[in-house]
Image (spheres, helix red, strand yellow):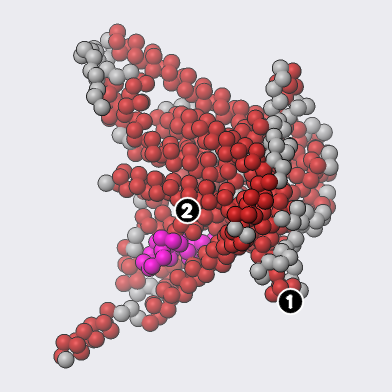
Amino acid sequence: MASAAHTVQRKRVLRAPTATRLRHWTLRGAAITYLVAMIVVPVAAIISKGFAGGLDTFREAMASAGAWEAIRLTLVTSALAAITNAIFGTMLAYVLVRYRFRGRGLLSAIVDLPFAIPTLVTGVMLVAIYGPNTPIGKAFGSVGIQLMFSQLAVLLALCVVTLPFVVRTVQPVLLELDTAEEEAAQVLGASAWKTFRAVVMPAIRPAIAAGALLAFARGLGEFGSIVFVSGNIEGRTKTAPYFIFQLTNQFKPDQAAAVATLLFAISFALVLVTSRLVRTERKEAKA
Amino acid sequence: MSVVLGPPRLVDVTPGSEEMRRRGRRRALVRGAIVAACLLYLAVVLVAPLVGIFLSAFSEGLPTVFETLTAPEVRHAFFLTFQITIVTLLVTTSLGAVTAWVLVRHRFVGRRIMNALVELPLAMSPVTVGLACVLLFGRGGWFEPWFTARGIQVIFALPSMILVTIFICIPFVIRSVAPVLEELGTEEEDAARTLGASTSQTLFRVILPNIRWGLLYGIALTTARSIGEIGAVLIVSGMLKGQTETATIYVLTAFEERMDTEGYIVALTLAAISIVMLGVIEISKRRKIREVMG
């Protein structure tokens, strides 16, 4: 009995004062309410509406003209843009980290431009320089290549918009990487390419993958830059986000929600995988 | 997997040797090629388009630029964008900072789910965000009866445009403040408290000064994004001319109405604003990294 009284007393001592606990719960309550009201409720609305009619709603949506082509175009162009930026992004990150030259700060800022410039303005910019009435557009047109209002335009817009992702994930990893290993490889007779492949590449591969996945996920949902440059031609340059936009405007919110759920499920899975990739990498770097 | 080793290759690595000089030359060549490829890519996807929009906007001379920017509908469009941005900033900065704090400092069941929730808007197409708002507040939506009964117009009006912008911008402040808070630790706070500082003193004298660059980085990203948002806003706005037309929607409709020069001018203005924001982003990012590194 004596020991029980003792425990009670200890509990009372360990417990934080009421004011602190109240503040604790107020903050936590505010954060939870914020995320639930602003994120959980809208997402729940999309998913419940998308699945309300089972898979039939989805099938109905996909029966409309140009539906499959739109989804395929989005998947293919997003993948191509992710690959292009994986290559150029890795090179840019390497240049920014390892080379010292005048204008490096400016180059670094230019890489971030697509994060700052409104996506619609990105599209307008592309049409301003590569549109059919511009000198460059006319030159390409004369050899039969239409730069804007084509599938190529969709790819180009996605390349611009997703440019920073790979650079920004690879750069910190390269910064952490000790140059001693590279120097050792070179002293031991490895060529520059072999050094990169055998020493640098294994260290930055997860970061490249993470950046490319983020770029791909972003590409799947991109609307602003594409709506202007693609021309939205049914069956040719209409993308999945534009398809959702169209369904919504045609007062078919159920079908729009069904397609949106599919798109969103893919990109959310990708984003979660990526943040796990980056987190494990950070832990490894710290260890 | 087996590695086949060739005959050992002895390399003369003394500085100035023929072999090292040959390598130096090759490396300089490779380096030049890589830099050239990078610059070419950036020129094609970013620099040339920037030049293009600049030339197009000024193609009819300065007076047209001035006329366009002072036209009532353009001013109204920018004012609308400004309103949306200010409210979004107020909400996402204050509640975002609180959420980052709770995510970093509190331990509770469901914290990991909350972490994942914060990333959710990044995976959502702006179009889907707009659609969600239509499903909630549009005809037959979950909350529509409640608001209609009170005579509050949400969809095709400012409230819905603000709501979708907030949704899209939620991750920015949280994700730029959380790592700074994590690195900061609790030592300084504990010291302040032990020395008798009140909660508000600790907040304003210790915590806020320490996270200010991370916070500014999040604010700059939020501003850039809310000024430029189009997909979600377009769906919920209903595109009511002169009423729910933001600056980005103005650009889109200008081209549809064959007012190309006006479209280019407003688009260039938006680009100019975002380049200023980029300056803030670059500075605060550098300071933020210093904050994190200590």
- Residue A6 drawn at (x, y percent): 19, 86
Callouts 1 and 2 in the same chain: yes
Badge 2: residue crowd in 10 Å (few <14, some 14–19, many ≥20):
many
- Residue B150 drawn at (x, y percent): 73, 76
Amino acid type at circle 1 is Arg
Q: Kindly identify which numbered label has been placed on residue A140.
A: none
Residue at (62, 41) in percent of width and height: A71
In the image: residue B248, left or right of residue A257: right
Subunit that carries the residue with mark 2: B
For this orientation, the residue located farthest to the left is: A2
- State the residue in front, B246 or A237: A237
Q: Are marks 1 and 2 in contact (CB under 8 Å)?
A: no
Secondary structure found at label 1: loop
Circle 2 residue: B176
- State the residue in front, A38 or B216: A38
Amino acid type at circle 2 is Ser
Residue at (35, 47) in percent of width and height: A280
Secondary structure found at label 2: helix
In the image: residue B123, left or right of residue B290: right
Relative to B248, does residue A131 appear above or below in the rendering? above
Q: CA distance from mark 1 to mark 2?
A: 38 Å
Circle 1 residue: B150
Q: Is residue B18 visible?
A: yes
Q: Which residues are magenta?
A: B90-114
- Of the numbered discs 1 and 2, the one sitting upstream in the chain is 1
